[in-house]
Image (cartoon, coloured by chain):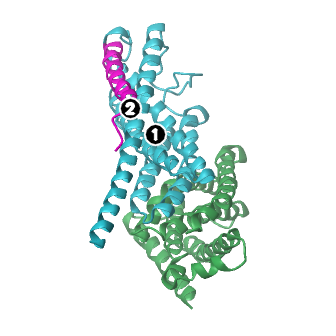
Amino acid sequence: MPKPNPRLQLMTISSLILIILSVYMVLIYAPREIIMGDVQRVFYYHVSSGWIAALAFLVTLITSIMFLATQNKSYDHVAMSSAEIGVIFTTMNIVSGSIWARPVWNTWWTWDPRLTTATIMWLLYIAYLFLHAGLEGHDRRRHITAVYGIVAFISVPLTFMAIRIWRTIHPVIIGSADPDAEGQFDMTARMTTTLLFTASTFTVLYFTILWHRVRIQSLFEYMSKLQYQMYNDLKER
Amino acid sequence: MRKKTLVSALLIFSVMVTLVFTFALDLDKSTKDNVAVGVLWVTFVFSSTLGLNQTFANEKNQSSLEGMLLSPIDYTAIFVGKFISTYIFVIIVEIIVIPMFYILYGIPLFSPLFVLIVLLGSFGYTLVGTLLASIATRTRAREIMLPILLLPVAMPIIIASVQCSNAILSGAHWGQFSNAFNLVIVYDIIFLGVAIMTFDYLIQE
C-alpha cells in the first residue's frame, strides 16, 4: 500500500502559502494601473494561467513522445494528468481575459486571432480528454492518445505566436508592442515583480497538482489490480 | 459496390447542405459575395467528414483490418492507400459542387489559383481526417468522435483556405493572401510528416 508522501505534503502546504502571498502581491503590493484601474490586476493571473497551460501541454507533448519511444506507462499517466490541468488553466485564462475585456474592449468576446487560436487549443485538449475516456483497452488507449497529444500540440505555439505574427487587438506586454492593440501599458518594476511572483506560484501549484493527479492514477491502477486478484480468489473458492 | 452508394449519398448530401444554407442565410445574388465561399467550404467540410467516417467502417464491420495488417507490406502503405481513395472521393464531390455554386450564385470559380487552393485545402483536411478516422473507429461512439477530434485540428487550414479563396475570388494581389496560402502549405507538409510517422502506432493492436 503506497504511503502518503511527506515531500508532496510539503509542496501542497508551500503552494497554499505562496497563493496567499500572491493574492497580497496582486491586490496590494502591485500599483494601480492609471488608465484601466483595478481591473488591470486580473492581468497577473491571466498571464500566469496562460503560461501554465502552455507548460502543461508541452509536458503532455514530451511525455507522449517518451511514451511512444519507451512504452513506459507512467509517461502516459503524466501526459493525461498534465492535459487535464492544462484544460483547467486554459479555462481560467479565457475567463479572466473575458472579465478584463468587458471594460477595456467593451465586449466579453471578439473573434481576434489570439482569442480564436486559444479557443481552438482549448477544444483540442478537451477532445484529447474525451478520447482518453472513450477508448477501450489500456494499451491501445495509451498509444492512440499519445499520437493525439502530439497532433494537438501544434495549436500551442500558434496561440503563443498569434499576437506576434498577426495584426490583433490583444496587447503584447512582454516583447514588442503592436500599435493596433487596445489596452496596452508599460510595466513598472513592481508590476514585473508581481508578475514573476504569480507565475512562479502557479508553476509550483502546477507541479503539486500534477504530482497529486499522477499519484491518484497509480493508486487507481493499484486498486484495479487488487480488485482483479480478489475476483480471481473468489472464483477459485 | 458500397463505395458507389457512398459517392451518390455524399453528392445528395452536399446538394442538401447547399440548399439548407441558401434558405437559412437567405442567400441571393446581393449577399452572396460575403458568405458564398464560406458556405462552399462548409459544404466541403461536412461532406468530407461524412465520407471520412466510412473510411475504416468496412474494415471494422468485417474485421478485415487484421488481414491487411498480416500482409507483408508497410503499414504506411495502408495509410497512403486509404488517404488516396478518400481524397479521390472528396475531389469527385468538389467537381460536382463547384459548378453547382457557379450556376446558383454566379461566382467565377474556375480560376487556376482557386482550383489549386481547393485541392491543397482538401488535401490537408483529408490527410488529418484519415489519420483521425483510424482513431475514431476504435472509440465507443465512433461517428460522433470523428468530428470532435477532427474539427479543432483542422480549424487552421479551414480558416486559411476560406481567407485565400475569398481573396482570390475578389481579385486581390498575391501579397494580400500569401500568409494564408503559406499556412495551408505548411499545414499540409507538417501533417504529412506527422501522419507517416505516427500511423504505425495507431494501427497496432
The alpha-carbon separation of the residues under discs 1 and 2 comes to: 9 Å
Locate residue B23: give its quadrant.
bottom left
Pointer 2 local density, CA inside 10 Å: few below 14, some 14–19, many at least 20:
many
- Is residue B83 in view? yes
Up-down relation of residue A172 to residue B106 (above or below): above
Up-down relation of residue B18 to residue B165 (above or below): below
Q: Which residue is mark 1?
A: A115
Give the extent of the magenta segment.
A1-27
Badge 1 amino acid: Leu
Pointer 1 local density, CA inside 10 Å: few below 14, some 14–19, many at least 20:
many
The green chain is B
Up-down relation of residue B164 to residue B24 (above or below): above
Give the number of the disc on residue A97.
2
Question: Main structural element of the magenta stretch: helix, strand or loop?
Answer: helix
State yes or no: discs 1 and 2 in contact (Cβ < 8 Å): yes
In this picture, residue B43 sits left or right of residue A233: right
- Which of the marked residues, 1 or 2, is nearer the chain's N terminus? 2
Picture coordinates of residue A70 (x, y %)? 61, 51
The cyan chain is A
Q: Secondary structure at mark 2?
A: helix
Picture coordinates of residue A206 (x, y %)? 42, 32
Q: Chain of mark 2?
A: A
**Residue name at image x 49 percent, y 14 percent:** A186
Do callouts 1 and 2 point to residues on the same chain? yes
Picture coordinates of residue B65 (x, y %)? 58, 78
Q: Residue furthest bottom?
A: B1
Q: Chain of mark 1?
A: A
- Is residue B31 in view? no
